[in-house]
Image (tube, helix red, strand yellow):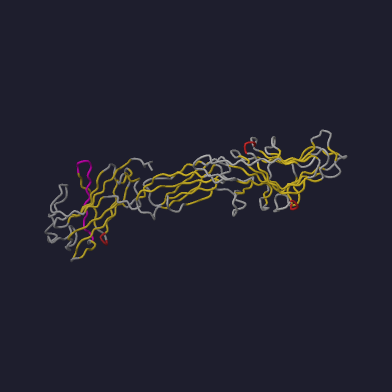
């Protein structure tokens, strides 16, 4: 009987979801499309020949796997075969095989089937099969068993007559599979407002050919990208139009990658965080979420109020030390230099738990550093205030205002104070010169007993 070939029309599959854009992937056994060595071939009882599957080779004479029947008393028995399994959640759409059958005797059969128990792509009974590299289209609806089988054997119980060794040589099989399922993923490490670098954990899951890489970034800017970890999951033809993978690849199906998204170059404002996961078939799933960038948050409201007299808060009498300061605009408790038009700035210099509607949230009882600076107009020029100028600290809780020990100016007009609170309040930093003129800064803070889990 002559070689027969069953040709089945290729059925193109559409995209399964709006986030998928699938293409076929080739999975190779023994050798890749250009002859690269792949030391695997599914389940088989074939023996290696030539370079086997562990040495590169693009022709049948270079080596591969062989089914060999040597006559015993003129008869051969049994079957030599290899069965390759199509990955779950994918469908076989094509098959490429480089094979040769020689020395076949009457009653012996060669077959290539996909699936292995249903559709015969080619077969021969009693006749040799010349060396060839052939490609077949496969109806994906018929691959219910998810396997491909190539075999040479003698089905007759009494054996088959043969004059010499009968051989089936196979140097490569490539299975083209369709994967239309987009990957799924979850993201950890997001927060809003965000500042500095977002350290994201992207946990991916793919039921088809496997996860390829994840990307993340602020939409409209370049994205950080990282491949999911694997040691045997590289495209065998990276410059080609198709993806070619080893059949025994270890491409990740459930794994995670860390991505670091920098926000430091962005102006403060509202943005969209984009996270994307792509599988080896080109299916893409995207997640967009709003994020507020707040790298330069004003953690307090600066007020530069110049007034004569008191504000109604319990503060020391501004003129009580007038004689000690010559009543010439000198700084209270400091030198007699004039400090006209004082200007005070203050801000929280440590990262709070979070910022809620523009108000920093501090941890209950934790010590926080506040930094500031005081400048004065001296001899017609604005300069740093002299050392030891005193700054008062007031705390408004509800409707009551309380005094707290203050701080004094250091070199270059700089100010530092460490504060710890157990309740929410408004903190006011106030400087009063000897003429009773003031400059103050008010910062409203919230206090929480536990570190916030909000993002």
**Which residue appears farthest toward the top when viewing the image?**
157
Between 380 and 435, which is closer to the camera in this rendering?
Answer: 380
In the image, taking residue 431 as reference, residue 451 lies left or right, namely: right
**Residue range of the region highlighted in magenta in the rendering:** 387-400
Q: Quadrant of the N terminus?
A: top right
Q: Which quadrant of the view contains residue 24?
A: top right
Which percent across, then down, holds residue 245?
62, 48
Q: Which quadrant of the view contains residue 101?
A: top right
In the image, taking residue 154 as reference, residue 362 lies left or right, namely: left
| Residue 81 visible, this orientation | no
Which percent across, then down, holds residue 109?
78, 39
| Residue 311 visible, this orientation | yes
Residue 261 within the segment the image draws in magenta: no
Q: Which quadrant of the view contains residue 122?
A: top right
Query: Which residue: 61% across, 43% down?
Result: 177
Q: Magenta residues: mostly which secondary structure?
A: strand
Which percent across, then down, holds residue 359?
30, 46
């Amino acid at each position: 009987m002559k070689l027969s070939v069953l040709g089945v029309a290729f059925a193109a599959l559409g995209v399964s979801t709006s986030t998928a854009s699938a293409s076929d992937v080739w999975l190779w056994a023994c050798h890749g499309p250009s002859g690269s060595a792949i030391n695997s071939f599914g389940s088989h009882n074939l023996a290696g020949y030539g370079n086997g599957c562990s040495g590169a080779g693009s022709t049948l004479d270079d080596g591969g796997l062989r089914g060999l029947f040597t006559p015993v008393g003129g008869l051969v028995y049994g079957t030599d075969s290899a069965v390759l399994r199509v990955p779950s959640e994918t469908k076989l759409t094509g098959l490429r095989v480089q094979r040769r059958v020689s020395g076949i005797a009457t009653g012996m059969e060669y077959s290539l089937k996909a699936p292995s128990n249903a559709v015969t792509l080619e077969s021969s009974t009693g006749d040799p099969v010349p060396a060839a590299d052939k490609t077949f289209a496969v109806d994906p609806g018929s691959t219910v068993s998810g396997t491909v089988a190539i075999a040479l054997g003698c089905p007759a119980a009494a054996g088959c007559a043969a004059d010499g060794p009968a051989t089936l040589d196979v140097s490569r099989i490539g299975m083209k599979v369709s994967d239309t399922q987009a990957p799924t993923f979850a993201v950890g490490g997001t927060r809003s407002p965000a500042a500095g670098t977002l350290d994201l954990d992207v946990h991916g899951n793919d039921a088809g050919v496997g996860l390829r890489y994840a990307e993340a970034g602020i939409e409209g800017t370049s994205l950080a990208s990282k491949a999911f970890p694997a040691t045997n999951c590289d495209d065998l033809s990276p410059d080609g139009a198709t993806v070619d993978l080893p059949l025994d690849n270890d491409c990740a199906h459930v794994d995670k990658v860390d991505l670091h998204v920098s926000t430091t170059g962005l102006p403060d404002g509202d943005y969209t965080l984009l996270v994307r996961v792509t599988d080896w078939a080109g299916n893409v799933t995207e997640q967009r979420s709003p994020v507020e960038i707040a790298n330069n948050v004003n953690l307090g409201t600066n007020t530069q109020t110049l007034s004569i007299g008191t504000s109604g808060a319990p503060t020391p009498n501004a003129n009580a030390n007038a004689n000690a300061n010559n009543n010439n605009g000198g700084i209270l408790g400091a030198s007699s230099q004039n400090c006209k038009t004082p200007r005070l700035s203050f801000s929280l210099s440590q990262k709070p738990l979070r910022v809620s509607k523009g108000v920093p949230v501090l941890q209950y009882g934790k010590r926080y550093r506040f930094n500031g600076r005081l400048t004065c107009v001296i001899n017609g020029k604005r300069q740093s205030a002299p050392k030891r100028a005193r700054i008062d600290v007031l705390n408004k809780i509800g409707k009551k205002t309380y005094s707290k020990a203050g701080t004094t100016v250091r070199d270059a007009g700089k100010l530092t104070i460490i504060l710890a609170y157990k309740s929410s309040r408004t903190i006011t930093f106030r400087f009063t010169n000897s003429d009773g003129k003031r400059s103050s800064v008010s910062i409203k803070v919230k206090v929480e007993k536990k570190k916030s889990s909000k993002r």
